[in-house]
Image (cartoon, rainbow, N blue to C red):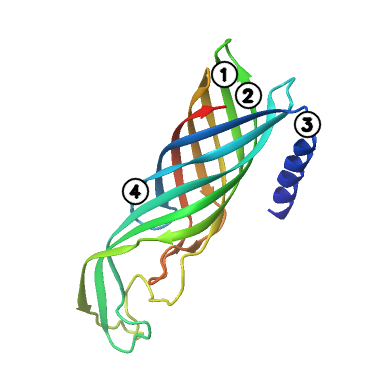
Amino acid sequence: MNTLKIFCWALVLFVAQNVTAKTVKYVEVGVNRSTFRHESCTPGYGISGGLGLDYYPFSKFGGFVGSGLKLQNIRISLKDRIWEANLNQMDNYFKKGDININLLFVEIPLQIGITKKISNQTSLEFHCGYNLMIPLSNNNKINKSRVIKLEPNDQGEYDYDYERVDGRVEGFENLFFGGKIVYKSYFFSLSIEKAIDARQSSDTIRIYDEIEGYLFNIGYNF
């Protein structure tokens, strides 16, 4: 993965030196549908959007490289879960309820792609790349929680879902691919994001899993 990062940044630096390269600036806004890769969960919908800049040093075949600065609100619901009631669990009393994940991330993408013109006013774009997701804030909530008592199994262990932690929400990395339909200066885009590694998704309960999703955006090219 370090090789991919170096390659992407090298492309960005190369085209930044080329003052004659075509550039396309854009703004976009839309929604995302997020889920965990392994956890049984209810996918949630959040707001996404931001600014981007694509460089076209390879104009003969429409190749480009780009980056940007974007925001993404990730929402996921976990129903009927059991977790430790205290940070240092010393008894067999646990909590049970619904956990609503609500996170806000800064997204820094590095992408490459190609644009194919299909008419004077319409074109198709295909892209792929790497995202760095940096957490800004979280508004995770626990609903309908209640204290329950569990009985240990034959090995003296308790069957529960999550441990309590004294930590923070962690950033993560993902790979993405997708496309755009561009008409004049307006576009509709769809991207699919696949997390590279698992990260903790709650600051009080250890939910350690990959976050994945779909992004549906509309935007405007300058």
First-in-chain label (1 vs 4): 4
Q: Residues within 10 Å of mark 4 (few under 14, many from 20)?
A: some
Q: Is residue 81 left or right of residue 12?
A: left
Q: Which percent across, then down, holds residue 207?
A: 41, 66
> Which mark is first along the chain, 3 or 2?
3
Amino acid type indicated by mark 4: Gly
First-in-chain label (1 vs 3): 3
Vertical side of 44 occupied by 222: above or below:
above
Numbered tag placed on residue 123 in the rendering:
1
Q: CA distance from mark 1 to mark 4?
A: 31 Å
- Is disc 2 in contact with disc 1, using a CB cutoff of under 8 Å? yes
In the displayed structure, 38 sits above or below 121; it is below
- Residue occupied by mark 3: 19
In this image, 209 relative to 151: left or right? right
Q: What's the amino acid at mark 3?
A: Val
| Viewer-nearest of discs 4 and 3 | 3
Which sits earlier in the primary sequence, circle 2 or circle 4?
Answer: 4
**Mark pair 2, 1: CA separation:** 7 Å
- Numbered disc in front, either 1 or 3: 3
Nearest to viewer (mark 1 / mark 4):
1
- The alpha-carbon separation of the residues under discs 2 and 4 comes to 31 Å
Badge 2 is on which residue? Answer: 115
Residue at point 48%, 56% (across, down): 210
Please give the residue where the numbered disc 4 appears in the rendered image. 44
Give coordinates of residue 45: x percent, y percent.
35, 45
Q: Residue at x 44, y 41 (%)?
A: 214
For label 2, the SS is strand
The answer for how far apart the CA atoms under marks 4 and 3 are is: 42 Å
Tell me which numbered mark, 4 or 3, is placed earlier along the sequence: 3
- Give how far apart the Cα atoms at labels 2 and 3 are: 20 Å
Q: Closer to the observer: label 2 or label 3?
A: 3
